[in-house]
Amino acid sequence: MIVEAKNINFAYTKNGRQILNDVSLSLKEGEVMSILGPNGAGKSTLLNLIATLLTPDSGEILLCGKDTKKMKPKEVASILSYVPQTHTPAFSYTVFNFVLMGRAPKVGMFEKPKAEDFKLVEQVLEEVGIAKLADKPYTEISGGERQQATIARALVQEPKAILFDEPTAHLDFGNQIKTLRTIKHLSEKGYAVIMTTHNPDHAIMLGGTTAILDKKGKLTVGPAEEIITESTLKSVYDTKLKLSYFDEAGRLVCIPPNL
Ligand code: ADP
């Protein structure tokens, strides 16, 4: 397994709400998992725990079979990249330098990036289709381009697993689909990928595994087609939704009732 969470329990404060209640999940190479759940359920918290930014109250997080409690941040970074929600940084780094920062865990603390680091950044910018933007300030590119740059930054870290926190939030429809395509492509290339989303159609399109986190902190994990049902959607979103097979799309679509 590349990513494994075993019986995780977590609350932010001692007597606070149990955000995660005996949560377990695992991903092998090339596997993709979408996490659905209502606002405030704890999806970002779960990603933060896997990324070792938070520590579980009990349970274990393993990366490539190793307990993260025994791993240095650099070792974690050699396996895992985290793509947080897109944001506008206060400093206007060029796209190239923004992506180059993804090499930080590989480049020694007192060392400068080497020719091979620059070459890798060039290659990855080409691969994600934003080579032309290399010299532009990161603050002056569009939301869709910024998402591609953030993905490029995750890739130059050369991880085995990538976590995406709501990668389609704030993006227009075209860029949402483009991002999902990139995520699917990454899993096909062998990365283990986890993403959180508010859109059940995105989980259906991505396929693979879907996990639903409820307000009691329970995570239900299984194949997308088994987990996403009208009844589970009703319980997640507290609204009646219809799932209907759409021939032309070759998949189920999630349809809300008329207003
Ligand atoms: P989701 O990503 O599913 O919307 P979050 O993981 O962001 O949910 O938050 C889960 C719950 O934990 C929410 O009730 C939120 O208010 C609370 N929470 C998030 N971050 C913190 C924090 N740093 N300290 C205390 N409570 C937090």
Image: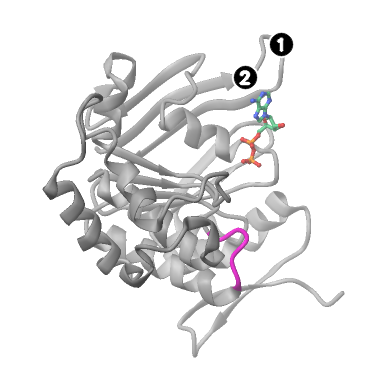
- Identify residue for label 2: 11
Q: Is residue 138 left or right of residue 183?
A: right
> Number of labelled discs?
2
Q: Are marks 2 and 1 in contact (CB under 8 Å)?
A: yes
Q: At which x and y percent is residue 175?
A: 52, 72
Residue located 67% across and 14% down the image: 13
On whether ligand 1 comes within 8 Å of the CB at mark 2, the answer is no
The quadrant of the picture showing ligand 1 is top right
The part of the image, by quadrant, that contains residue 253 is bottom right
Q: At which x and y percent is residue 98?
A: 39, 49
Secondary element under disc 1, as helix, strand or loop, is: loop
Residue located 58% across and 34% down the image: 218
Q: Is residue 208 above or below residue 9?
A: below
Which amino acid lies under the numbered mark 2 shown in the image of this protein? Answer: Ala
Residue located 31% across and 27% down the image: 62
- For this orientation, the residue located farthest to the right is 259
**Quick check: is 157 in the magenta stretch?**
no
Stretch in magenta? 168-172
Q: At which x and y percent is residue 157?
A: 27, 43
The part of the image, by quadrant, that contains residue 229 is bottom right
- Identify residue for label 1: 15
> Image quadrant for the C terminus?
bottom right
Secondary element under disc 2, as helix, strand or loop, is: strand
